[in-house]
């Protein structure tokens, strides 16, 4: 790989907080356009090879064809609702990896690539691609001196994400006591059992295994940002109350020291893959978060309606408003109507704005005229799409029989013992799908 294409220009972009704190800036790496063209050709061959060999773990949802963050969220929420429905105690552990992409060791990465079958000229190309990389920082019109990059996948590159998947793949493929869900470096574990002590033992055992893996692969977990959530509908339910992330000295000992080991914090809610999961699974915190963002979009749209035609306003609605409410909707859209009511009202408000109507006329004719689905209808539409795609796959494995009756699939819908299960896609999906096929 040409050395002239290995130089990156890093521009710090302010996020939030104090402008005097370097941690409040996000480094954006700019690479050569020609470099990206070459990488796209190599990426196509690399992804084809990894797919053909089935190398990437099924627990890895990141940067893979026909798999998205919503797929990971659906699988995660399916497990939780299933286990809560049958009376199990459920705990989720959400791991934060410190500077994951910047911590990749090149030698370890190349060893893993060799072991997965990338050898000969292809291996030599990747070895050249990773070596002798340089970067400088640009602030305004000033450039810093060049620095060597001996660690991490190239930021801003086409191949960076795929190389990281290879690096972390053996973690996703490892056998843990709990279930692992990973989207690149966003990793979560789920545990369920009737015994609280067994869950606690399983979590602490897996944290030991994680510490060993991260130490071996020269990566670090942030214990202060790693949290666990006890999912339960009962206020007085007993919970897991002490989770310890061991230090390197405790890996060879059955005892946990109190000096260097870190206690993982328990949280009532956590943001995972863009959704705020609360311990009671009522989605109030997530809906509240969406509501705040939608208010800003509504104000902006109201201002723009005097300058834009209807077609432009509708494009703004789809790109800014609907994209917000439809993300993860199959997970949270089945909650109580009282919880959804603020979003429903906001949607009606923005529909009136883009049609230049006041508050009095009913909104339903406007939805119909503009071919825009109201929130509940959008939820049904998204569920139908997901269920149609997944009805014969792993997500709904065991729900559908292998025979038809009057050309309509017969589904085994598990008995719902709790409302949270009635609101889940694996309960709602088959019912909606059958109704859709019989209409």
Image: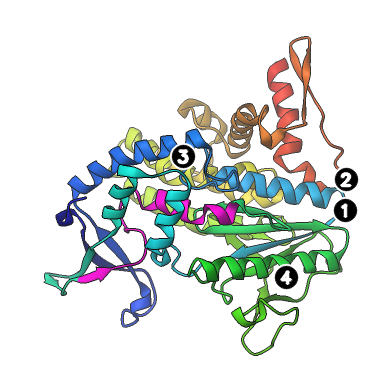
Front disc: 2 or 3: 3
Answer whether labels 2 and 4 touch (C-beta < 8 Å).
no
The residue lying at 64 percent from left, 31 percent from top is: 390
The label on residue 435 is: none
Task: Tell whether 419 sits left or right of 187.
Answer: right
Answer whether labels 2 and 1 touch (C-beta < 8 Å).
yes
Of 161 and 432, the residue lying toward us: 161
Residue interval drawn in magenta = 147-172
**Residue for badge 1:** 87
Residues at marks 4 and 3, CA–CA distance in whole angstroms = 33 Å
- SS label for mark 4: helix
The residue lying at 72 percent from left, 62 percent from top is: 279
**Residue 420 lies in magenta, yes or no?**
no
**Residue 161 lies in magenta, yes or no?**
yes
The label on residue 50 is: 3
Q: Earlier in the sequence, mark 2 or mark 1?
A: 1
The label on residue 417 is: 2
Residues at marks 1 and 3, CA–CA distance in whole angstroms = 40 Å
The residue lying at 51 percent from left, 56 percent from top is: 168
């Amino acid at each position: 790989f040409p050395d002239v294409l290995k130089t990156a220009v890093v521009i710090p972009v302010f996020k939030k907080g104090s402008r005097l704190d370097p941690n409040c800036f996000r480094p954006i790496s700019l690479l050569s356009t020609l470099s990206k063209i070459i990488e796209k050709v190599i990426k196509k061959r690399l992804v084809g090879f990894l797919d053909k060999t089935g190398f990437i773990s099924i627990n890895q949802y990141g940067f893979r064809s026909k798999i998205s963050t919503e797929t990971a969220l659906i699988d995660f929420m399916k497990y939780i609702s299933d286990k809560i429905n049958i009376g199990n105690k459920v705990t989720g552990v959400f791991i934060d990896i410190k500077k994951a992409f910047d911590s990749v060791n090149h030698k370890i990465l190349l060893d893993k690539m060799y072991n997965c079958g990338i050898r000969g000229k292809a291996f030599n190309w990747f070895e050249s691609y990773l070596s002798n990389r340089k970067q400088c920082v640009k602030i305004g019109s000033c450039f810093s001196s060049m620095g060597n990059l001996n660690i991490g996948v190239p930021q801003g590159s086409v191949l960076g994400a795929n190389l990281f998947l290879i690096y972390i793949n053996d973690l996703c493929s490892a056998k843990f006591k709990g279930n692992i869900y990973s989207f690149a470096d966003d990793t979560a574990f789920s545990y369920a059992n009737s015994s609280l002590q067994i869950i606690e033992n399983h979590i602490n055992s897996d944290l030991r295994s994680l510490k060993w893996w991260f130490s071996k692969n020269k990566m670090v977990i942030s214990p202060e940002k790693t949290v666990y959530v006890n999912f339960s509908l009962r206020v007085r339910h007993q919970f897991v109350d002490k989770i310890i992330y061991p230090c390197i000295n405790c890996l060879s000992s059955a005892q946990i020291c109190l000096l260097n080991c870190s206690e993982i914090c328990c949280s009532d809610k956590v943001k995972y893959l863009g959704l705020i999961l609360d311990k009671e699974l009522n989605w109030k915190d997530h809906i509240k978060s969406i509501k705040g963002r939608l208010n800003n979009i509504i104000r902006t749209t109201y201002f723009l309606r005097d300058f834009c035609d209807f077609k432009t306003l509708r494009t703004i609605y789809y790109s800014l408003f609907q994209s917000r409410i439809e993300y993860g909707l199959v997970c949270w859209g089945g909650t109580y109507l009282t919880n959804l009511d603020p979003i429903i009202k906001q949607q009606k408000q923005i529909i009136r704005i883009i049609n230049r109507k006041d508050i009095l006329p009913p909104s339903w004719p406007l939805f119909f005229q503009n071919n825009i689905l109201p929130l509940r209808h959008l939820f049904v539409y998204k569920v139908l799409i997901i269920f149609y795609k997944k009805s014969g796959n792993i997500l709904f494995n065991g729900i559908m029989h292998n025979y038809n009756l009057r050309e309509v699939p017969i589904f085994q819908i598990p008995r719902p013992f709790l409302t949270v299960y009635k609101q889940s896609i694996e309960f709602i999906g088959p019912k909606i799908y059958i109704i859709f096929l019989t209409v």
